[in-house]
Every structure is written in structure tokens, then in C-alpha cells.
Amino acid sequence: MISGGFLVGEALVGEEPEIAHIDLIIGNKRDAAGLAFATSFAQPRQGHTPILAVVRPNLPVKPSTLLVPKVSIRNLQDAEKIFGPAQSAVAKAVVDAVEEGIIPRAEVEELVVIVSAFIHPRGKDYQRIYRYNYAATKLALTRAMQQFPCIDKILEEKDKSIHAMIGFRMNNLKKPPYLEVALDIPDWRRVEGIIRALPRTDALIIEAGTPLIKRYGVEVVQKIHQLRPETVVVADLKTLDTGNLEARMAGDATADVVGFSGLAPLETMEKFIEECKKVGALSLMDTLNVHEPLEVLTKLPVKPDIIELHRAIDIEKTQNLESEWGDIKLIKQVCENKILVAVAGGVRVSKVEKALNAGADILVVGRAITVAKDVNGAARAFLQKMGVEEVDQFRIMTDF
Amino acid sequence: MSEKGDEVITVSEDEINEEESVFHKKLKLKLKDKGKEGRILFLKDYLDYLMRENKTIPPDFPTFVREIMGLDERGGFIHIRIWHENSELVEFARKKGYEYRIDMYD
């Protein structure tokens, strides 16, 4: 069944501190798995001594299974947990997997299993350590033999999942439309109030506006992320010079998207985009006062991730202009549909449909939400008009 | 502004154009000591809380210090502007056992 190489399985089961995390490989003795088995067996490392899984003393399991502790064994208590309940659980799971046909009985002499087990030093309940490690090992074996997960599953889940320990996920803005709330008010306590009042949904982005950043520094992004770890935060720097330096500063301050001005020299823009890629942030080109955004985009060898078609607040105040966003579809075509288009300046609920029909992916809204008496209601009015589903980021994973 | 066929939208054009809408709340907080010493104690306590809770220092902290030192004391209470009843300051006041109440702006 496993003709060459090896299969890999993983499973996380239970609650802290006894939570079991199993990584394992199963493969043929004559291939890489066998070599790894023998090498690990012959070269134990301090605190990570591999042991053979046994049903009881003097009765090792088949396929031969090596248990390797992930956490360094520092004392007798740690050793007892790994050699006692964890080892027994792994052994029982492997044998049960054979009995249940998960591992082909005919191949038990040909196969080896290497199980890497996490036992928290604070785990005390042997019942739970045993049960969790048994379940995790069996699940990891099943997954390995089924070659779970398939690549389609991974691609589907990669932007949705929240790691159990970090509590948030990277949102790469793959599912537009988004509502970007621009926080231009340079008063932190007021900004904090707005952030707390905003609905929690994947479709909402928070922008640390240029005035806010100028008042408090780019570290304000970190504070926003502390309040909303799961939300994409844009640092609207409008960089005109020292592209790599400013992009790096914003990246260090945990910005997910960093904005530069389309008026900057080409070299600055190129360095900015390049640096954004290095720090894992998306780059945004702000076209405020840029007469031919398309021309600028065409000149750039590497395109930004987002282009913001921007109308200035000052113009908005003094002139009674309708928003003009230009030919969004052509912009996307030039960028081979690999760019998100944001529209900003005077976006109201009544203009949502027009903007979306024109091809906008992100609607940037400032005062229509931030100075509303009911911030939450105002934001929801936009989301509703955008056809965005209500809160979806606390989706419960029930499929595995 | 409301849209036909949609839910009631709470933002009016007047509100949108309003530069400085006044609709914040007041956190009325009783200092544990009077006068300048009481304010310094409060600020130290707040900073201590932020560090122990692994919270990033609020970006307006230098301004906040000046504001607190300059606020009038009314019957042992200082009135701090807040925009949300669950703001970090309220959370701090609650967790550190300060006597406080939240009022709408009057």
C-alpha cells in the first residue's frame, strides 16, 4: 500500500494542559522512513530519547513504532508522562489501527511508524493524557493512510482558519467586497471607541489614517491590532520617499496593508512594494492627485496588491463633485486581475451599488461611519448594502 | 439619511458633515488619594496595569498624562472623556477596584 517514501499524519486533540499534538510518519523499512527510524533510534538526543512503543513490557507493537518526545524531558515527572500514559496510548492506537484495517495487516513487518508527541509539562491528569494521545495517534494514522488533507481542502481553508494558540489569522483579502473604515480622527480614545463599536466581520478592514499615524506614530497599528487581532489593518502612510524604510516600519508595527503615494518616484514605489513582500504585508498605491493612475501602474514592473482610487477630503468639502473612480475594469485588466481596487472619498450608502458595479473591491468610508452617533449601525448599513453576510469569523470548525 | 426599501440608516447628512460631534461619555473615577499625589498614583497604577496585562501603551499616553494632571477634581472624582463603555480605561478601573461610574456627556 505504501510502495515508496512515507505518509505523514497530524492531529491535535483535547484541552490544555493535557492537549495531545501528534505528528507522525509511516513508511517502508527499506525507504526513507526506515532510515529515519534507525538513525533516530541509534542517535538519541538529550531530553528527546526515542522509545519503542510497547503494548506491555517485552511486547513491542507492529509496525515497529518509535515515540519521540517533542518537549525536552527535564525530570522524572516529564519522563513518567511520556513513558507511561503517552507511550501506552500510542502503542494501543497503532495496534488498534492494524486491527481496524487502517494499517494493512499484511504489511506490518514492512512498515515503521515514527510518532512525535507533545506533552505539556503542566499536564497532570494521566487519564486525559492517555485518552487524548490515543485519539490523536489513531486520527493521525488514519489521516496519513488517507493522505489527508487533499490540496483542495488546504486551499479552501488556508484563509479561513484560526490557529488555536495564536487566536487570529492572516486575511489576504481574497474574498471581496470589503468595507474599509478609515480612522482619520487624531484622538486615540475616540478611535478606540469607534473600533470597539465596529461590527466584527471578516468583511471589515480598519485603516489607520494618515492624520492618526502622524499624531501617534505607526505603532498605533499595533494598538489597533491589540483591540482587533483578527482584523486587517491598513497603515495609510502615503509614502513619497524612502519606500523600503517606511514599508518596513509599518510591517514591524504589524500592518497588514501599507499604503504609498502614486506620486512617489518609481524607484521609491518599487522598493516599497518589494519591502512589503519581505515583511508579509500587502502594498497599496494611493492615487490621490495622480492624474493617470493607469500610466503609473503600467510603468511599475511589479504591481501593488491594491490600488486606491482616491478623492481628497479637501476637494470633497469645497466642491460638489460626484465620485469619479475611472475605468476600474481596465485597471484590473492591465494588472491581469491580480489587483484589488479600493475607492475612497465621498462613499455613502447610496453609492455602494454604483461602486461595486463599477468593479470596486474595497469601499473606503471615513466620516460617514466614524462621526455617526451609531457607529455600529452606520457600518452595518454599508455591509448590508454590500450584501455581506453577518459576522462570520467566529465560524465553528465542525468538519474535523 | 434613509433609503427606500432598506433598513433605517442611522447616519444623516448633517451628522456626516458634523466636524466635532459631541456624543462621548464621561468616566467619573474616584482617585485613591487627593491632589497631585492622587493623580500620579493613578497614572502609575494605570501604567502598571498595562504592563502586567501585556497591553500596548495607548498611543495618546503622553497627552493623557497632561490631561489627567490638569483635570478638575469634583468631590474626589475626575471626569475622563471616553467613547465606549468597555474602553481600556473602564476595564482598568473595574479590575483595579476604582470607584467609578459612566455618564453621558452633559
Image (cartoon, rainbow, N blue to C red):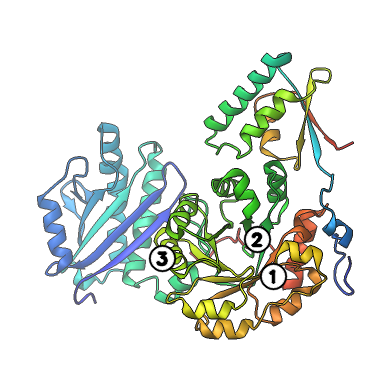
Amino acid identity at mark 1: Val
In the picture, the quarter occupied by the N terminus of chain A is bottom left
Asked whether residue A224 appears in the rendered view, the answer is yes
Could you tell me if the residues under marks 1 and 2 are in contact, i.e. CB atoms within 8 Å?
yes
Q: Nearer the viewer, residue A273 or A315?
A: A315
Mark 3 belongs to which subunit? Answer: A
Secondary structure at numbered mark 1: loop
What is the spatial separation of the Cα atoms under label 1 and label 3, in whole angstroms? 32 Å
| Residue underneath mark 2 | A201
Considering only vertical position in the picture, is A67 above or below A108? above
Query: Which of the numbered marks, if any, corresponds to residue A388?
Result: 1
Task: Specify whether disc 2 shares its chain with disc 3.
Answer: yes
Q: Is residue A120 left or right of residue A159?
A: left
Could you tell me if the residues under marks 1 and 3 are in contact, i.e. CB atoms within 8 Å?
no
Judge the density around disc 2: few (<14), some (14-19), many (≥20) Cα neighbours within 10 Å. Answer: some
Residue at image location 54% in from the left, 66% down from the top: A284
Residue at image location 70% in from the left, 65% down from the top: A312
Nearest to the eye among marks 1 and 3: give it.
Answer: 3
What is the spatial separation of the Cα atoms under label 2 and label 3, in whole angstroms? 30 Å
| Residue underneath mark 3 | A274
Task: Pinpoint residue B66: horizontal percent, then vertical percent.
Answer: 68, 28
Amino acid identity at mark 2: Thr
Task: Specify whether disc 1 shares its chain with disc 2.
Answer: yes
Q: Nearer the viewer, residue B13 or A244?
A: A244
Q: Going from the N terminus, do you reach mark 1 or mark 2 first? A: 2
The image quadrant of residue A319 is bottom right
Q: Is residue B70 left or right of residue A227?
A: right
Residue at image location 52% in from the left, 36% down from the top: B54
Task: Pinpoint residue A130: horizontal percent, then vertical percent.
Answer: 36, 47
The image quadrant of residue A359 is bottom right
Q: Is residue A388 left or right of residue B106?
A: left
